[in-house]
C-alpha cells in the first residue's frame, strides 16, 4: 500500500518537473540560435526577436519573430549575402514597365482618345469643348491617342506605378515591421 502511493507521488513529481522545464523553454525572452553573419536582438518591451545581419548580408525572409503557442510565427531566417537587386525591386520595375507600355495606350483608347481622333459617345467626346486650347491636358491626351504617348510620359507613369507597387508590396506583406 505504501509503495503504491510513493509511485503515484513520483509520477506526479515527474509531471511537474516536465511541465516546469517546458515553461522555462517556452517563456518569452529568448531568441533562436544566432546565425552565421548575424545575431538576434530580443526586444523585451514588445516580446519579439529581431534578426540583425552584418554589413553585406540581409535576412533571408521575415526577420521579426514572435514565439506564439509554443512555436515561432514565421520560418526562422538566416543571413544571406545581400544582392544589389531584390525581388521586390524587379516586381516593381516589371509592373511599372507594363503600366507604361501597355496601360497608357489602353487607358487612352478606353477614354476615347483613338488614333482616328476623339471617339463619338466616349468620355473624351463628353469632355471635349469648343474652347479646348492647344497645349491643354485634353489636347495632350488627344495627341498621345493619335501618335502614341511620349517616352517621357511612359517613363513617368512607369516610375510612379513601380514606386506604388514597391510600397504596397511591403504594406501587404505578412512580415512584421521593425
Image (tube, rainbow, N blue to C red):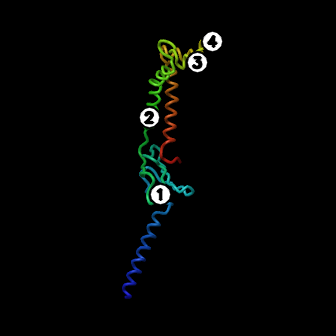
Which one is closest to the eye, mark 4 or mark 1?
Answer: 4
| Percent x, y of residue 114 | 48, 16
Name the residue rendered at 48%, 43% in the picture: 173
Which one is closest to the eye, mark 2 or mark 1?
Answer: 1
Q: Going by the picture, which residue comes out furthest to the front?
A: 121
Q: In the displayed structure, would residue 29 be above or below residue 114? A: below
Query: Mark 2 Cα within 10 Å, few/some/many (few <14, many 20+)?
Result: some
Name the residue rendered at 49%, 21% in the picture: 110
| Percent x, y of residue 71 | 43, 58
Which one is closest to the eye, mark 3 or mark 2?
Answer: 3
Residue 131, disc: 4
Residue pointed to by mark 1: 68
Q: Which of the pair 131/39 is nearer the observer?
A: 131
Residue pointed to by mark 2: 91
Query: Mark 4 Cα within 10 Å, few/some/many (few <14, many 20+)?
Result: few
Quadrant assignment, res 3: bottom left
Amino acid at each position: 500500500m505504501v509503495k503504491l502511493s510513493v509511485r503515484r507521488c513520483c509520477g506526479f513529481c515527474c509531471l511537474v518537473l516536465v511541465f516546469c522545464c517546458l515553461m522555462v523553454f517556452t517563456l518569452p525572452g529568448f531568441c533562436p540560435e544566432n546565425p552565421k553573419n548575424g545575431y538576434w536582438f530580443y526586444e523585451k518591451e514588445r516580446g519579439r526577436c529581431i534578426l540583425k545581419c552584418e554589413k553585406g548580408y540581409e535576412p533571408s525572409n521575415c526577420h521579426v519573430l514572435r514565439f506564439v503557442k509554443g512555436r515561432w510565427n514565421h520560418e526562422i531566417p538566416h543571413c544571406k549575402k545581400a544582392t544589389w537587386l531584390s525581388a521586390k525591386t524587379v516586381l516593381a520595375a516589371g509592373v511599372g514597365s507594363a503600366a507604361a507600355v501597355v496601360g497608357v495606350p489602353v487607358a487612352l483608347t478606353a477614354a476615347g482618345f483613338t488614333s482616328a481622333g476623339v471617339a463619338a459617345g466616349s468620355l473624351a467626346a463628353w469632355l471635349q469643348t469648343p474652347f479646348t486650347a492647344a497645349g491643354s491636358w485634353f489636347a495632350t491626351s488627344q495627341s498621345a491617342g493619335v501618335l502614341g504617348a511620349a517616352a517621357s510620359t511612359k517613363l513617368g507613369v512607369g516610375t510612379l506605378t513601380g514606386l506604388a507597387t514597391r510600397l504596397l508590396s511591403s504594406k501587404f506583406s505578412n512580415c512584421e515591421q521593425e
